[in-house]
Amino acid sequence: MQGISKARWLLIGLSILWVLLAGGPGGSTLHAEVLPAEASELPPYTFVNKVSGKFKVSGSDTMRKMLEQWQRQFRTIYPGVAITLETKGSSTAMPAFLKGDLLVAAMSRKMTDKETEAFVTTFGYEPTEIPVASDALAIYVHRDNPIQGLTLAELDAIWSKSRRRGHPVNIERWGQLGLTGEWANAPVRLHGRKPVSGTAAFLQKRVLLGGDYKEKVRKQPGTASTVLQVMQDRYAMGYGGIGYETSDVRAIPLAEEENKPFIEPTVATALNGTYPLSRRLYLYVNRSPEKPMPSAVVEFLKFVNSRDGQTAIVRTGFYPMQPHRISENLALVQADNKP
């Protein structure tokens, strides 16, 4: 799998407010941070002695790269902590929660009302929601595709047989989107995700307005494989987190509706919400109000919500949270760990 495209690094580079160089805890090195213009400096992670234990994080495939970054860096700081990752899709986290063998779930969407209800019924309290990263859900096409942009109604007509956004015709070929020459009669070959995917659920709710996907959508096991299919097929279209963009695919600018401007997925448009498919990525924690969380989980959450943890997100091509939100997260984690 190729790395983040040069264009994406350029966009990130232009959005960097400052670069802080410092030695992180446990020998880690702090790299460039991406922060909104109004941000204050995020605090670095503070090392704590005698942290050990093990826990599992299950859920989102989209978040796999950042979870692996956090896992590696945290293990460097605390060799006595073992973190197991299982990233088969956001919807796989709730069954693990309900069995009682999971403390932390990763989700690329908000937990549904039905999932929250099942959690409360089982445990007697609500899960703790912690937004840990920002994402621009990208609609990917091959780098040679000349399409300039799409509206959400056009996307709905491409992906859904329901067409709840009211587009007058079903879209099957690139010529229906204004492309000419070799593209005019070329089919739009769709690559999506399996039903357990939080990304598929987000797109279905946000773009399809709850409508049904077309049967012809080829369901891929993960975002990386979706992007790979688009890389190999000039006429393909797929979707996935912005952190999976490569130099062989292109993220299409999107417009909320016709006659509105097409918006590029960037750090700025994801954080301010102007990109139509901007979203947050979450960690959900099973935290009993009757007892403190294990120290290994607490320190992991503090690390994720530190300068070091948010910098790791940037390295994977995703976007960090705003500092005021990070401060709220840290206050929540620290307050809730009191016996």
Image (cartoon, rainbow, N blue to C red):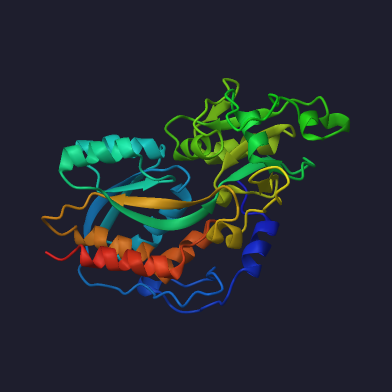
Tag count: 0
185 lies above or below 48: above
The outermost residue toward the top is 215
Corner quadrant of residue 289: bottom left
Q: Is residue 80 something that shows in the picture? A: no
Residue 338 as seen in the image, left or right of residue 46? left
In the foreground, 200 or 297: 200
Image location of residue 338, percent across then percent down:
15, 66
243 lies above or below 159: below
26 lies above or below 191: below
51 lies above or below 217: below
Residue 261 as seen in the image, left or right of residue 30? right
Q: Is residue 144 something that shows in the picture? A: yes
In the foreground, 30 or 37: 37
| Image quadrant occupied by the C terminus | bottom left
Residue 109 as seen in the image, left or right of residue 244? left
Image location of residue 332, percent across then percent down:
27, 64
Image location of residue 270, percent across then percent down:
56, 57
Residue at point 45%, 47% (across, down): 64
Image location of residue 59, percent across then percent down:
37, 42
Residue at point 43%, 44% (across, down): 109
In the foreground, 94 or 156: 156
Residue at point 75%, 26% (across, down): 173
| Image quadrant occupied by the N terminus | top right
In the foreground, 90 or 55: 90
The outermost residue toward the right is 181
